Structure formats: structure tokens, C-alpha cells
Image: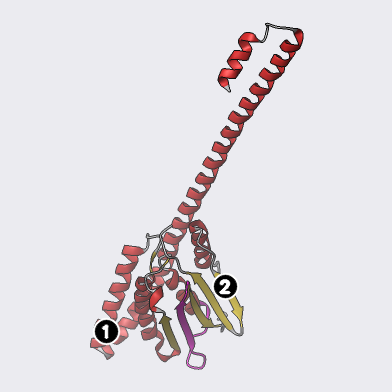
Amino acid sequence: MLALLISLLFNMWSGSPVELFSNVVAVTVITLVVSLWFLGYHFIELWRHSVLEKEQMEKEQISNQLAGLRHQLSPHFLFNSFNALQSLIEEDPQKAQQFVQQLSGMYRYTLVNAEEPLVPLSDELHFIEKYLYLQQVRFGRNLKSTIDAEPGCMNMLLPSLSLQILVENAIKHNIVSASRPLHISILASGNQIQVINELQPRADTGTNTGIGLENLFKRYQLLNAGEPVIRRDDGKFTAILPLLTTHE
């Protein structure tokens, strides 16, 4: 196209008036097409850069929110755990030792995997078993749990600490007592995992910002890996998370 334009520029003044007019029109059209192409390319590059910049900002925002969430929850959870440990040391030293091992393993996992975008379901389930053990020492028979995962799901992936966020949310916002025990079910099958608990909301949970659930939705959105589903029906709260087969 550039060679054609140069040729027309050199020869546009030769020939008859009709040929001159045709050459002027051709040069104008070619110039317009080239200009539009460069302009379009420029705007596409600007748009692409803007999209990448926005995605990077969202990733950084989610990372900061997750860090803030961990700092917010960890002291509260540790306080309750140490209170439970103090009672165990006096009542059952052997069980207290097991409690410390579970607590240590849980925080080791948090330090190693908290910044990982995706982790195997098997690792998340081992972690949540430790977390539930500590909570059940605190609440006793008032907190019950069931974990059932198909073998084919164990190597599938999900965002790190997803299950902890959902279980923490269930315990924090629902009554856990002898008269109203809380049962949490974790069920994995096919390409999804469900966390289900009874809806028996507490009146003293304060302002619920929903930052944990919001982060889960954003993390899945950035992975382009489907979207979590939240249901509140038949007296139950159900969170359904997609399980992934590969790192995005």
C-alpha cells in the first residue's frame, strides 16, 4: 500500500484531468485508510494497556484485602485457641499436646500457602480438618462437621484458604450452643465443592462487611474460572465453589 501511494504521488500530476482527479481521490483514500489503521491500532493498544492495568490493580487490591483479613482474624482466633489450650493443659495434658500440634500445622500451612493463587483440594481439606478440630475443642458437641470428598476431586484446585473463610463465616455468624448445635458439611463431587450450614444467625455479630465472600468472588473472577454460588433456602446457607483442573 505504501509503494502504491508513492507511485501515485510521483505520477498524479501527469496525464489528463480525469486521471489527475482519479489519482487525487486514490491518494486521499489510501491516506485515510492508513491514518485510520494507525489510529485504530493506537486506541487498541491504549485499551489493552488500560485493561491490564485495571486487572493488576484488582489483583493487588485483593491481595491487600486478604492480608488485612488474615491480620484481622488471626488475633481473635489465637485468643480463643489459647483460652481453650489453657483449659486443656489442666484437664488433659495429652490432648493439649495434640491441640498444639494441630494449631502449629494450621499456621504453617497458612504461612506457606496463603499467597498461592490455587492449591489442591486435598491440601485445603487437611488444613480445614485441623481448623475444625481446634474449633470443636472450643465448642465441644455444640459444633459438628462432616467432610465427604470424591477421590477424583482431591487433585483439583481452588483458591487458597477458601474453605477456612466459609467455615469461619459459618461459626462467626451463627448460634453455636447446646440447644442449637451448628452442623457444617463440606461435600466435594464432580467439579465443585459445597459448604453447608444451618441458618441460625446470631444477633451480636456486629456489622457484616462480607469481605471474605467478596474476595472469593473476585478471586474466581480474575481466574476466569466460573463464579461461586451462594444460596439461603430451607433454613440452610450453602456456598458452592467451582473446582479447577489447571492453574490459570
| Position of 142 relative to 171 (above/below) | below
Q: Residue shown at 32%/69% (left/top)?
A: 107
Query: Counting other residues with Cα less than 10 Å from the Cα at mark 2, is it few (<14), some (14-19), or many (20 or more)?
Result: some
Q: Quadrant of the C terminus?
A: bottom left
Residue 53, position as x, y percentages in the image: 50, 44
Q: Is residue 11 visible?
A: yes
Within 10 Å of disc 1 (Cα), the crowding (few <14, some 14-19, many 20+) is some
Q: Identify the secondary structure beneath mark 2.
A: strand
Is 30 or 188 nearer to us in this picture?
30
Q: How far across and down, in percent of the image, does residue 15 sit? A: 70, 6
Residue 57 vs residue 34, the one in the foreground: 34
- For badge 1, the amino acid type reads Ala
Compared to residue 148, the image places residue 74 above or below, namely: above
Q: Which residues are magenta?
A: 173-191
Name the spot of residue 64 as percent of width and height, x first: 44, 56
Cα distance, mark 1 to mark 2?
37 Å
Q: Which quadrant, please, contains the N terminus?
A: top right
Instruction: Name the colouring of the figure.
Output: secondary structure
Q: Find the residue positioned furthest to the right.
A: 18
Give the numbered dot on residue 230: 2
Q: Secondary structure at mark 1?
A: helix
Residue 204 visible in this rendered orientation of the protein = no
Query: For residue 96, which numbered disc appears in the image?
Result: 1
